Image (cartoon, rainbow, N blue to C red):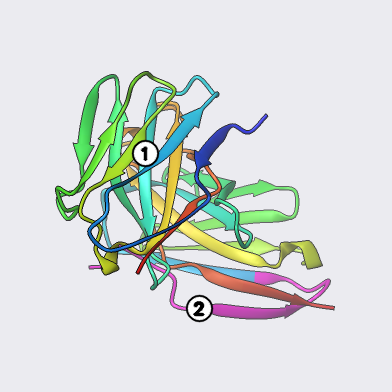
Amino acid sequence: DQQVKQNSPSLSVQEGRISILNCDYTNSMFDYFLWYKKYPAEGPTFLISISSIKDKNEDGRFTVFLNKSAKHLSLHIVPSQPGDSAVYFCAASGLGGGGADGLTFGKGTHLIIQP
Amino acid sequence: DTAVSQTPKYLVTQMGNDKSIKCEQNLGHDTMYWYKQDSKKFLKIMFSYNNKELIINETVPNRFSPKSPDKAHLNLHINSLELGDSAVYFCASSQELVSGELFFGEGSRLTVL
């Protein structure tokens, strides 16, 4: 029972172009969403988050969009850079934060930025 | 300084053995977690521990037990290891109910032969 789904295992984008990573969720109790980035042999690191009271959050080259009615969020990276090549995990939590219940993660999308 | 550190990074052992993975965080966080990333790459929560309250994911076998000697440490003990326990185990911490942001360790790859 996957409550957070990332249906694209991998995505290849040319350097300088926009990368769009998608995520869908099924649990309507989720109200906080995060994106994590993971390099090989390292732990995931926090990238950007969005609360359900917003529909957009921007941080430099990274923007997360949330469509609550569709239970869908996306991460936009523009312009894409070689260092962005990594696995990106979408994560969600309920009741305002991770708290003691932690986060529910998607399976990840491997983003490959081609020179 | 590493914020969340786990040891060992790699662990190879035989079926039936008992092993432990240690985790320490120097962020002053209230809550610590153990996650398992299996061969299908899902990151699934196993435990969370906050102020001596342990929350267990009901799918985790009771061969797995977390031990917290103090607020900065949450160690994972695994008894009678099975082949299916082979995975990467991540420790994480967070400041409870602030942002939901978790800080992860580098992971410990456990291989059971």
Q: Label 2 belongs to which residue?
A: A9
Dot 2 amino acid type: Pro
Left or right: B42 in relation to A35: left
State which region is magenta.
A1-19
Q: Position of residue B99 (x, y in %)?
A: 47, 33
Q: Is residue A96 visible?
A: no
B50 versus A107 height, above or below: above
Would you call the spot at circle 2 few (<14 residues within 10 Å), some (14-19), or many (20 or more)?
few
For the residue pair A83 and B62, the one nearer the viewer reads as B62
Name the residue rendered at 19%, 52% in the picture: B60
Q: Position of residue B89 (x, y in %)?
A: 41, 52
Chain ID of residue with mark 1: B
Residues at marks 2 and 1, CA–CA distance in whole angstroms: 26 Å
Kindly state the secondary structure of the residue where label 1 is placed: strand
Q: Is label 2 on the same chain as label 1?
A: no
Q: Position of residue A1 (x, y in %)?
A: 22, 68
Q: Label 1 belongs to which residue?
A: B33
Q: Locate residue B88: give its quadrant.
A: bottom left
For the residue pair B52 and A51, the one nearer the viewer reads as B52
Kindly state the secondary structure of the residue where label 2 is placed: loop
Dot 1 amino acid type: Tyr
For the residue pair B3 and A25, the one nearer the viewer reads as B3
Left or right: B68 in relation to B5: left
Name the residue rendered at 17%, 55% in the picture: B59
Q: Locate residue A110: give its quadrant.
A: bottom right
Q: Position of residue B19 (x, y in %)?
A: 33, 47
* Quadrant of the frame with the C terminus of chain B: bottom left
Q: Nearer the viewer, mark 2 or mark 1?
A: 1
* Quadrant of the frame with the N terminus of chain B: top right
Would you call the spot at circle 1 few (<14 residues within 10 Å), some (14-19), or many (20 or more)?
many
Q: Would residue A42 be counted in the magenta stretch?
A: no
For the residue pair A101 and A61, the one nearer the viewer reads as A101
